[in-house]
Image: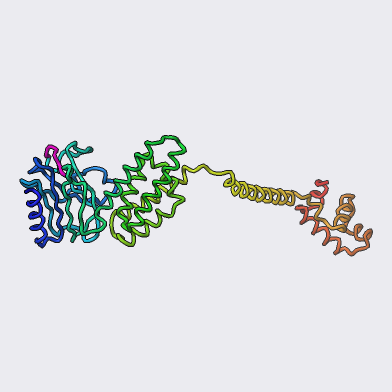
Amino acid sequence: MKKILLLVFFGNLMCLNAQYLFTGEVAEGNENLSVYLSLVENYRKSSRVYANQIIKEVKTDANGLFKFEGDNLISENRIYRIHIDGCEEDGNGGGHFLRDCNYTRSVLFIAKKADTISFPLLQNNQALCEITSTNENSGLLLGIDALKEEMILDFMEYSSKANESLNFQKWFSTFQEYGKRNKEPLADLYTYSFLSDRASETHAYYINDVKLNSYYDELTLRLNNNYPNASFTSQYQNELEADKVLRNDLVPKSRSSFWPYLLWGGVLFLIIQVGYFNFKRRQRKEKKNPFDTLTAQERTVMVKISEGKSNKEIASELFISLSTVKSHINNLYKKLGISSREELNGLF
C-alpha cells in the first residue's frame, strides 16, 4: 500500500510545472520532520551543515515524504545538500553551530535549476543514500564518498611507511582520474577539499603533488571554462597559488642551488678588488712628488738658482737667452706652487 501511495505521490509531482523538483522519503515514524535544502558555494564547508547555507525548509508529510520545488536555483550546476534534522529547533536549521547533530541525515549532490531528482528510501529504511536524477552528475559526490571509504580500508590494512606512500600515490591518482573521467569540476573541488585539508594525513603528500602534477593547473582551466564567474573558481586559484608557495618554502635547497650564489659572489669580489686598486692608483697619482713634473732644463735652472746664480749668469752658463731663463723659472714656479727664489730655497 505504501509503495502505491509513493508512486501516486511522485506521479502527481511530475505533473507540476516547477522548474526544479527534489523529492524523497524518510523512514516510517519520522513524519513531520524538518528537511532543509542548502547551497554549498564554499567547498571548504561541505563536511557538515552550516546554517547560513540553508535556502529552503519543508516538513515531511504523514507518509514521510518531502519535496522541494521552485525556480530560485542557479541555472548552472552547483553543490547542494539536503539534510533531515531531528535536532532541537533553533530557527536556523537545527542546533548545528560548530558541530553536527547526532540526529542529522544528509546527502550532497550536484544539481541545477531545471533538474528533477528523487531520493528513494532503501529497503533497510536508510534515507538519502541513493539518487535518481535527470542530471547525470547528481550522484558524483556519492561516488567520491564511496571511494573515501575504500581508501580508509586500504590504509587500515597495512600501516607501514612504505605502504602509506604507495597508497597515497594510488588514491590521489584514483580520485583525480575520477574527476577527469566525469568532466565535472565540482566533483574535483569536492575531492580537492578532502585531499588538501591541512588537518588531514593527506596534506603532506598533496603539497608535494601540487608542484609536480599538472592536474591542478588543468583543473584551473576547466573551472574557468565551466564556471568563470563563480566564487569557488577564484577561491581555488588563490588556494592553489598559496600552496605552491608553501611547497617551495618546505622543500630543502639542494647543494647545486648554491652555485649561482657562489658565482655571483666571486664576480662581486672581483669588482670590489678592481675598484680598490683603481682608487689606490689615483691616490698615488695625487701624492706624486711635484719635482717629478719638471723638465730636465727646468731642473738645471732650479739647481743654478739654488746655487745663488742670477738670471744672466744662468743664461750665460747654459748658452740660452735671458728670456728663456725667465720662461723656465715661471714654469717651475707654477709646477712647484711657489712664487719666489726664497720659497724655492726653502723647498731644498
Q: Is residue 302 left or right of residue 161?
A: right
The segment highlighted magenta reads 84-89
Indicate yes or no whether the magenta region holds residue 259: no
Indicate yes or no whether the magenta region holds residue 85: yes
Q: Closer to the camera, 312 or 267? A: 267
Q: Residue furthest top?
A: 159
Q: Residue furthest front?
A: 1
In the image, residue 129 sits, relative to residue 228, either above or below, namely above
Q: Is residue 274 left or right of residue 174?
A: right
Q: Is residue 305 left or right of residue 180?
A: right
In the image, residue 179 sits, relative to residue 145, either above or below, namely below
Residue at horizontal 81 percent and vertical 49 percent from the top: 342
Residue at horizontal 75 percent and vertical 53 percent from the top: 337
Q: Closer to the camera, 247 or 7? A: 7
Number of marks drawn: 0
Q: Closer to the camera, 153 or 51? A: 153
Q: Closer to the camera, 37 or 323? A: 37
Image color mode: rainbow
Q: Position of residue 110 (x, y in %)?
A: 24, 54
Q: Position of residue 312 (x, y in %)?
A: 90, 59
Q: Position of residue 92 (x, y in %)?
A: 14, 43
Q: Position of residue 11 (x, y in %)?
A: 9, 58
Q: Main secondary structure of the magenta part?
A: loop
